[in-house]
Image (cartoon, helix red, strand yellow):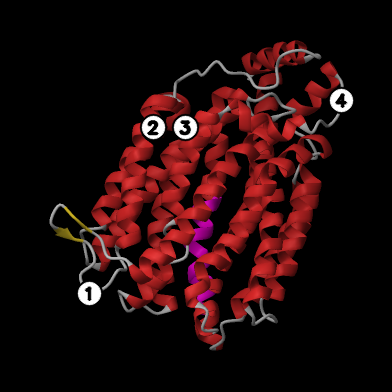
Amino acid sequence: MKNTLARLSTYKVLICLGIVSGVAELAYGILNQSAIPPYVQELGLTAHIGIIFAAFLLVETVFKSPMGSLGDRLGRRPLIVGGALLSAFTAFGMTVVKKLWGLLALRAFDGLAAAAIWPTMVAAMGGSVGPQRRTTAMSVLTVTYIGGLAVGPLLGGIANDVTDSRLTSFYIVSILFLLTAAIACFLTPHRSREETETAREAGERPFRLSDIALGLKAIPDMMVLAFTAFFAIGLLIPIVKLFAMNELGMSETGYGGLVFPIALAVAGASLLSGRIGDRWGKARSVRTGLLISAAAMWTITVVRGVWELATAGMFLGIGFVLAMPAWLALVSDMASPWTRGAVIGALGTAQGVGAILGASAGSYLYKLVRIDLWGIEFATANSHYSPFVVSAGALTTCFGLSLLFVKEGDRRRIGMAGEGEAIASKGESERCKAR
């Protein structure tokens, strides 16, 4: 009976965190995929779109580890609420600012907000369950992320097309972030049960500046993997919607209509991927997912039909949702409750550096560079396929690295050596058995 009540309490926490994450991801889906690219193009700043995205990613990258560590000390709720309020302000500010420097400044503040929200959210998810169910918990975040990608471009595109204004989607984003902050006040736990029990058993641990660098030193192999994977993703961030509009002749609504069913299919697959990862093994899930994603990206470089591209994109997403929750769960398993935010933040730093370089390179490749490999012409009339070619190569490299670095049952335990950590580790082991 006690175990049943504990399980129900766990699912309640996961649902609450999923609701908060879902609203925030919808806002980011509209902002990054629907609002910013056509607005920047309308302002005549298309050549700078990579820099605009890079400003966001740079600040997010620099502050992810400090913000994750701050969440370990202050609790999860203040970071999520504060980040959402800041993003609401920056989204509204985009409707006023027309100059490049202003857009860069707002995107930088938005990066600070994202750095507060996402490592904290991942750490909260990881602390809400034991290792046996951690991949399932992380898949909840993946579902909300894919859901944001599915609904965001469609909702933002329809809003812009109906009102004949590029600003409407920014107003929607601002409202959604205010809603995120409001519901996070009620649905986000201040600390997970695991964190509360650890603090009670081992005592509150004071903040240390060394905690910020802890993850950077503890998981260099995982950081290399993260950098490579998100370099591949970053290549596509600033150009996907422009590719659909310029190369395939789609309207904003048409692009959203294409993405919507693909993302829903991927979201459905992600509901299963968590349980597959917990049963099948985290390492195997990571490797298989990366292999599927790499194969799908290579397919995108050689097909030209809309639905052929859509099908390849669907498999790309399926590979992503199979690999990412298992990967986050694996890293979360390595960290003690009071260092989980810092460790996840460090992983996010590597992801951010990769995404920054990828976004900058993606816009350059899209505008200037054509690539031919092995006699196959990847850019027939222009360079619009070049970012996809480089992304495919990066994902293939990432799969190779996963064979070297990702191991089932990795024995590293970060932050569990001395000063009561042994007590906490023992307590965590007993809780895992109970779950």
Name the residue carrying label 1: 381
Q: Is residue 144 visible?
A: yes
Horizontally, is 213 left or right of 351 in the view? right
Assign the N terminus to one quadrant of the image: top right
147 in magenta: yes
Name the residue carrying label 4: 204
Start-end of magenta stretch: 144-158
- Calculate the distance from the C-alpha at mark 4 to the C-alpha at mark 1: 62 Å
Horizontally, is 382 left or right of 331 in the view? left
Q: Secondary structure at mark 1?
A: loop
Name the residue carrying label 3: 275
Q: Secondary structure at mark 4?
A: loop
Determine the image quadrant of residue 156: bottom right
Horizontally, is 78 left or right of 402 in the view? right
Q: Is residue 74 above or below residue 165?
A: above
Give yes or no for contact between labels 3 and 2 (Cβ–Cβ under 8 Å).
Answer: no
Name which residue type carries label 1.
Ala
Image point 86% across, 28% down: which residue?
206
Give yes or no for contact between labels 1 and 2 (Cβ–Cβ under 8 Å).
Answer: no
Name which residue type carries label 3.
Arg
Name the residue carrying label 2: 401
- Mark 1 vs 2, N-terminal side: 1
- Report the mark closest to the observer, 4 or 1: 1
- Mark 3 vs 2, N-terminal side: 3
Image point 55% across, 63% down: which residue?
53
Give yes or no for contact between labels 4 and 1 (Cβ–Cβ under 8 Å).
Answer: no
Q: Position of residue 133 (x, y in %)?
A: 56, 28
- Calculate the distance from the C-alpha at mark 3 to the C-alpha at mark 2: 24 Å
Name which residue type carries label 4.
Glu
Assign the C terminus to one quadrant of the image: top right
